[in-house]
Amino acid sequence: MDFMNSRRNFLKVSALTGGGILFGLVFPSFETNDTSTALADYMPNIYIKIKPDGKIVLMAPNPEIGQGVKTSLPIIIAEELGVDWKKIEVELAPLDNRYGRQTAGGSGAIRGRYADLRKMGAAAREMFVNAAAQIWSVSAADCIADDGMVIHKSSGKKLSYGELASKAVTMQIPANPTLKDPKDFKYIGTRITDVDVHSIVTGKPLFGIDTRREGMLFAMIARSPAYGKTLGNVDDTKARKVNGVKNVIKLKNSVAVLATSTWAAKKGRDALVIQWNTTGKLENSSDHFAGFKEILEKGPTTVGRNDGDVEIAKQKATKVLDVYYEIPTLSHCQMEPLNFFADVRDGKVELYGPTQVPDQLRNDVAEKLGINKDNITVVVPRQGGGFGRKLMTDNGVEAALVSAAAQSPVQVQWTREDDMQNDFYRPAEMYRYRAALTANELLAWHQSAVGIGRGIRGDSYVAGAMVNYRSDSQGFNSNTPTGWWRAPGACTMAYVAESFFDEICLELKKDPVAFRLDFFKKAKDAPVGRLGYDPIKYKTVVELVAKMSNWGTTPTGVYRGFATWFSFGSYAAQVVEVKLEDGKPRVTKVYCAVYCGRVINLSGAENQIQGAIVDGINHAMFPKVTFVDGAVQETNFNTYNFLRMYDAPLDIEVKFVESDEAPTGLGEPALPPIAAALGNAIFAATGKRLRRLPFAGQL
Amino acid sequence: MAKYSLSINGKIMSVEADDDTPLLWVLRDNLNLVGTKFGCGVAQCGACTVDLDGEALRSCVLPVSAVGKRKVVTIEGLSEDGDHPLQKAWEELDVSQCGYCQSGQLMAASTLLKSTPDPTDQQIDEAMTNICRCGTQVRIRKAIHLAAKKLNTK
Ligand code: FES
Ligand code: FES
């Protein structure tokens, strides 16, 4: 689509108050599938500011939760604009509809914005060139732009973007700016350090928790201690006597204590005497798993895919491998405990704090407070992790309610215990996988899943390469809330499918890498029904990681596991190496090959892959949430165990497949396969097949 | 409420606080030194690590009344211009992801280098028990080695 020519698409240039100039591009939103709202989605987007002193500021439109987009999105603009990266500044954009979809989720920021940010940078660059050409009365074709300067090639005359800004604003907006040839890229694909790294290592106030405002009160909130309990009588006499406590506010199902410091708010909160009434079922994790088992034994009701006939294949088989895998509930535990600043006074709302969905937060606050959206501002600072927790807006909404009731600016601070008991958890799940086998052949693959909440689970890549394949699933009702957790769905299914694949390889005496390559060949040459992936790309990453790790030549004392997975548009293949220390496996090295289209920032991209691998090893090894009578038993890091330095690999080698294709997801895809790769390595080392997460207690 | 004189980043600072207030919250709420972070409140995660007379200390569990005359160094006081070898190594290797845990990691690492200028991997394993959900441990280890090299070739 040539959208630059569409009637609604034009570059918008406007004067900034204070004399600067702002460039923005108007283009259709690219991330909506809903054509009925297409008109409303033609939104202007503003990304470049030239300050009066000539300083160039690039706007990063999506929330920064540690996925690196505050650095990588502006790199795309800078590349086409032709500026010196070292001389520009970057700001996180406030919530503004003209920026389109301002969400951190689904590994979508770069995927969604790459093409448009390039066009935007290029269009602005051409305007600077045209402005200079007019001033010098030369042809624009004789001028080049680089490092924030336009240069006349033959005479060597130069003008900076700052000097050209006021003229550039009068230039016609190019309908079809010429994009750089990727071989001339100066920044894209190179290593660029996080724009905030200096502020981070010097402890600057960057995060929501660091908010300090005139007249602000600190608040802590007593929430239900268990799912199934609701607020009864409240006696706040003692709480009000705590030094520094200013106010106690009863909300629908919680009680807020406001004070002059965080500690006073906490002491006040802890001094509340509250009766919590049991009004719902008080659930236990053990009952969840017993319920799962029952469903899996009967057979789940929703059929996702059914190719051929797995039942006939099972009858023909000489052996049916029939195993159950167990996945515990998990909490998000982003390092920055939830918090939010809100100032609700005189019908106006100011919100400042951690959220992955600022637009949704504004809608929710508007609805809850009955205040028009136009009177609500949302600004999102850098965030201490996201992992899906802040796709829910409860922390921001709650702060707004407290501020509105108190008529005061308030920072609501959560403790780690608050975070643990009031999460939207990664749901507990159980899987039953069956394989119909002969001595050297896999005849059928039958996967069944059940978990809290959603019923439908996806398919593994064997779907499309198997004549007989079936997936079925069923949801499980519970009042324990569930939500999105890094690489939702994929993060657990990959563990089960790829561990099971290893089990099959063992039965059939096949090499795990070679056997997968067979599958991709089958999927390419004779696909069965719909294929949810590109078998060539899968093959490419698997072959690359095999090469990186010298697969097949294991050094003595080293045990290896392999796994691969496709998610969020990208392919990841991994080899994990473990050694035995005092009889226990220790991860020493991980190799990872990734196919994610063009890499924008090599440093940030590597960090995402390494981080996802360590995160995945952590959650495969250590933590789990257990509900007893609706209450989370693991209330802090003393029982919700987390990986430490010793448990992390000594080295993680990452390679990206070189590609000219548009970038695909990166924040999540390296996480799904790692638990299986680790489990497979542990099996190689110990002979123990671990079909239950987390592993640590079983070693 | 009581008055306390604390030695923080080379200056004497006076604060008024309840005697059971953890040093962490005195730093953050009374002194507006928000570089020291809250992560758990139970001495598990290390986000609140400060240097107390040369030792790594989890400030979330140290009441202000117990600090006494001991010298506190926070991330804000680790170096004048952010040019401590660790800070430089952290920047060079692009260690951080979300960045939230990193001030605690740096303070733990700086006390490690004080007692052990050239730590082995094993010594790093033992000293660096801070949590990082983003998974930056691999680069933290490398950055400590790099900083040790910078220190020792100075
Ligand atoms: S906040 Fe002190 S160790 Fe976690
Ligand atoms: S960098 Fe995010 S928790 Fe460590």
Image (tube, coloured by chain):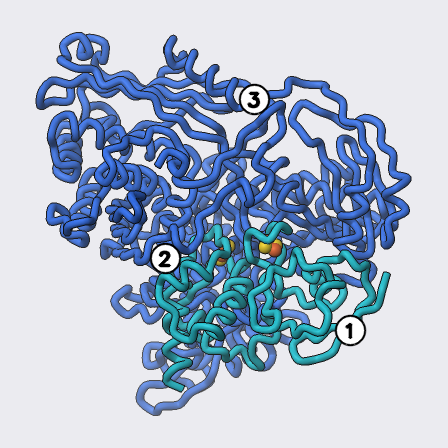
Chain colours: A blue, B cyan
Q: Which residue is mark 2?
A: A605
Q: Position of residue A327 (x, y in %)?
A: 42, 29
Q: Which residue does the image show at 50% across and 80% down from the upper left?
A: B83
Q: Nearer the viewer, residue A316 or A162?
A: A316
The residue marked by circle 3 belongs to what chain? Answer: A
In the shown orientation, is residue A620 left or right of residue B24? left
Q: Position of residue A543 (x, y in %)?
A: 16, 47
Q: Mark 3: which amino acid? A: Asn
Q: Are marks 2 and 1 on the same chain?
A: no
Q: Mark 2: which amino acid? A: Ala
Asked whether mark 1 lies closer than 8 Å to ligand 1, one says no
Q: Which residue does the image show at 32% across and 57% down from the upper left?
A: A650
Q: Are marks 2 and 3 on the same chain?
A: yes
Whole-Å distance between the Cαs marked 3 and 1? Answer: 50 Å
Q: Nearer the viewer, mark 2 or mark 3?
A: 3
Q: Which residue is mark 1?
A: B5
One can see residue A5 in this view = no
Whole-Å distance between the Cαs marked 2 and 1? Answer: 46 Å
SS label for mark 2: helix
Q: Nearer the viewer, residue A537 or A577?
A: A577
The residue marked by circle 1 belongs to what chain? Answer: B
Q: Position of residue A573 (x, y in %)?
A: 25, 45
Q: Nearer the viewer, mark 2 or mark 1?
A: 1
Q: Mark 1: which amino acid? A: Ser
In the shown orientation, is residue A445 left or right of residue A237? left
Q: Decide: marks 2, 3 in contact (CB < 8 A)?
A: no
Identity of the residue furthest to the front in this view = A582
Circle 3 Cα neighbour tier, 10 Å, few/some/many (<14 / 14–19 / ≥20)? some
Quarter assignment of residue A479: top right
The residue marked by circle 2 belongs to what chain? Answer: A
Q: Which residue is mark 3?
A: A284
Q: Which residue does the image show at 13% across and 28% down from the upper left?
A: A526
